[in-house]
Image: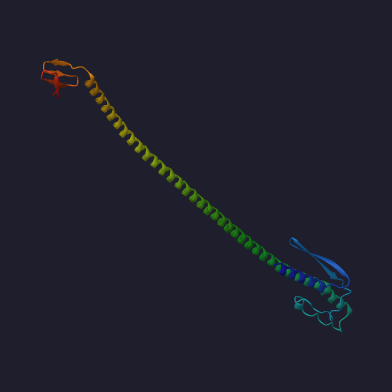
């Protein structure tokens, strides 16, 4: 686009230099918000009409001026010359027409540049949205991966805690069973000790009943006397 704009400006400069003579005169043309300044040659320093070389395609459209009639009078020639537009006016009109054409072309170029800029901005916006969406998706994927990793670690810790708790419960149950068996064994030993103590006291204590030929001790045993020498046999009572 910058190259086209430079070419258009060079073309305008060429049109301006085509009508510039040694003596220069400024001419201002206002077109909308834009103003154009052109430097025009003086009339008296221009070449005659027959030697004038047309350099603009728009000026070639003008018909050639009619040849002067030698039989006509001088006032009529002056009147015809006054009725015809002067060379400067024709140049100015041609320059205005070229300027309007170039202005329209520049306006089209400006609209094309604006459309290209608008499409470029829209493309940049779409690319920015796509980039932001891709970045957000990447961030979301990373967050999901980190969450899954943390969840896996928490699950492993929970599994370890549950395993340790189960082992502790099993150990506590084993200790409880061992304690119950130990208590039963202690009770049984206590009973046996009590029984032996009772038996020992019975064996050491005096007899409860004594008669001729029979006596009963505290343990419920009966002794019978045999003969006259005091011998006894022990028998347990029913």
Q: How is the image coloured?
A: rainbow
**Residue 87 picture location, percent across and down:** 83, 74
**Residue 38 picture location, percent across and down:** 81, 67
Q: Image height check: is 210 above or below 106?
A: above
**Quick check: can you spot residue 100?**
no
Q: Image height check: is 52 above or below 216?
A: below
Q: Is 203 in front, or is 166?
A: 203
Quarter of the rendering occupied by the C terminus: top left
Q: Is residue 114 left or right of residue 198?
A: right
Tell me where residue 184 sits by quadrant: top left
What residue occupies the far bottom of the structure in this picture?
70
Q: Is 109 in front, or is 230?
A: 230
**Residue 99 picture location, percent across and down:** 76, 69
Count how many numbered circles sit on residues in the image: 0
The residue at the point 37 percent across, 39 percent down is: 171
**Residue 37 picture location, percent across and down:** 81, 65
What residue occupies the far front of the structure in this picture?
229
The residue at the point 43 percent across, 45 percent down is: 160
Quarter of the rendering occupied by the N terminus: bottom right
The residue at the point 84 percent across, 76 percent down is: 81
The residue at the point 71 percent across, 67 percent down is: 2
Tell me where residue 9 sits by quadrant: bottom right
Q: Image height check: is 189 above or below 44?
A: above
**Quick check: can you spot residue 160?**
yes
């Amino acid at each position: 686009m910058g190259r086209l704009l430079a070419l258009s400006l060079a073309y305008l400069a060429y049109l301006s230099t085509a009508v510039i003579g040694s003596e220069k005169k400024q001419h201002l043309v206002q077109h909308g918000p834009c103003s154009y300044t052109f430097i025009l040659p003086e009339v008296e320093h221009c070449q005659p009409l027959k030697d004038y070389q047309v350099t603009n395609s728009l000026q070639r459209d003008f018909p050639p001026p009619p040849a002067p009639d030698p039989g006509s009078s001088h006032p009529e020639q002056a009147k015809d010359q006054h009725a015809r537009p002067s060379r400067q006016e024709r140049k100015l009109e041609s320059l205005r027409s070229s300027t309007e054409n170039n202005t329209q072309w520049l306006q089209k170029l400006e609209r094309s540049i604006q459309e290209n800029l608008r499409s470029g901005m829209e493309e940049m916006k779409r690319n920015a949205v796509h980039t932001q969406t891709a970045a957000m998706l990447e961030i979301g994927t990373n967050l999901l991966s980190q969450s899954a990793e943390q969840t896996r670690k928490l699950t492993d810790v929970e599994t370890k805690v549950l395993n340790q708790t189960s082992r502790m419960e099993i150990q506590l149950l084993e200790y409880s069973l061992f304690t119950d068996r130990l208590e039963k064994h202690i009770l049984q030993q206590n009973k046996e000790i009590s029984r032996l103590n009772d038996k020992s006291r019975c064996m050491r204590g005096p007899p409860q009943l004594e008669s001729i030929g029979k006596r009963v001790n505290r343990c419920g045993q009966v002794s019978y006397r045999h003969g006259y020498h005091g011998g006894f046999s022990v028998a347990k009572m029913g």
